Image (tube, helix red, strand yellow):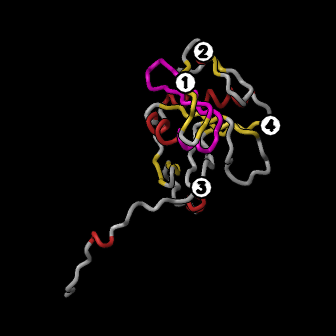
Amino acid sequence: MLQTMLDLDDIKPDGPRPLSRREYDELVNLGVFENEKIELLRGMLVTMSPQGSPHARMIVWLTRRLIKALDDSWEVRPGLPYAASDDSEPEPDLLVTVADPTRPDHPSTALLLIEVSNSSLRKDRKIKLPIYAEAGVPEYWIIDVSAAGEVSVAVYTEPTKDGYAKLVTLRDGDVLRPLHVPIEIAVSDLPR
């Protein structure tokens, strides 16, 4: 009979062990997360919210609009990984960057990131926003589709190490004019 039992307090971890983006990518390539919708944020695996109809409609519409308006010197990436930092690889709803056919991995630069939010609004503001600002993304949009029939777009610019210095919220009657992407979109044209 064992005289000494393990004391769980003696062996409990000091805290969670974060993953690096490199480790995460290796696990993804091995198929470890094959049937899971997750992304790497601040070294932690975070589940992604399911996409309802308003969310999906908006992404399809924006993807078509951006691809039609931009030539082949641009890359429009819907729902694909963005190599934001050594410990974060979010999957924004849309990423626009300069095309680079020689890039072997996920892009580490973006000119415009877009998140379409319904149930993910808190995560998009509290977790992803500082990650994108720290990565130097010059413009980040959060399109809020949480209210039936209404759309508002929070446009964040002027990234700093502490977030974005400027926020403008646009609604019907306003026009989205990205700083570094040659396109204009009337908010009233966005699908409901």
The stretch in magenta equals 129-158
Horizontal side, residue 100 vs residue 56: left or right: right
| In the depicted structure, whether residue 187 falls above or below residue 6 | above
Extreme residue in the bottom direction? 1
- Residues at badges 4 and 2 in contact (C-beta under 8 Å)? no
Q: Quadrant of residue 29?
A: bottom right
Residue drawn at (46%, 49%) of the image: 46
The front one of 71 and 125 is: 125
Q: Position of residue 60 (x, y in %)?
A: 61, 30
Going from N to C along the chain, the mark reached first, 1 or 4, is 4
Going from N to C along the chain, the mark reached first, 3 or 2, is 3
Circle 3 — which element? loop
Q: Can you identify the residue that label 2 sits on?
A: 174
Circle 4 — which element? loop
Q: Which numbered circle lies on residue 133?
A: none
Q: Position of residue 34 (x, y in %)?
A: 53, 55
| In the depicted structure, whether residue 25 falls above or below residue 143 | below
Q: Is residue 50 visible?
A: no
Circle 2 — which element? loop
Going from N to C along the chain, the mark reached first, 4 or 2, is 4
Please state, as top left, top right, bottom left or bottom right, where the N terminus lies in the image.
Answer: bottom left
Q: Can you identify the residue that label 1 sits on?
A: 153
- Compute the Cα span from label 1 to label 2: 10 Å
Residue drawn at (48%, 59%) of the image: 18
Q: Which numbered circle lies on residue 73?
A: 4
Going from N to C along the chain, the mark reached first, 3 or 4, is 4
Q: Can you identify the residue that label 3 sits on?
A: 86
- Compute the Cα span from label 1 to label 4: 26 Å
Circle 1 — which element? strand
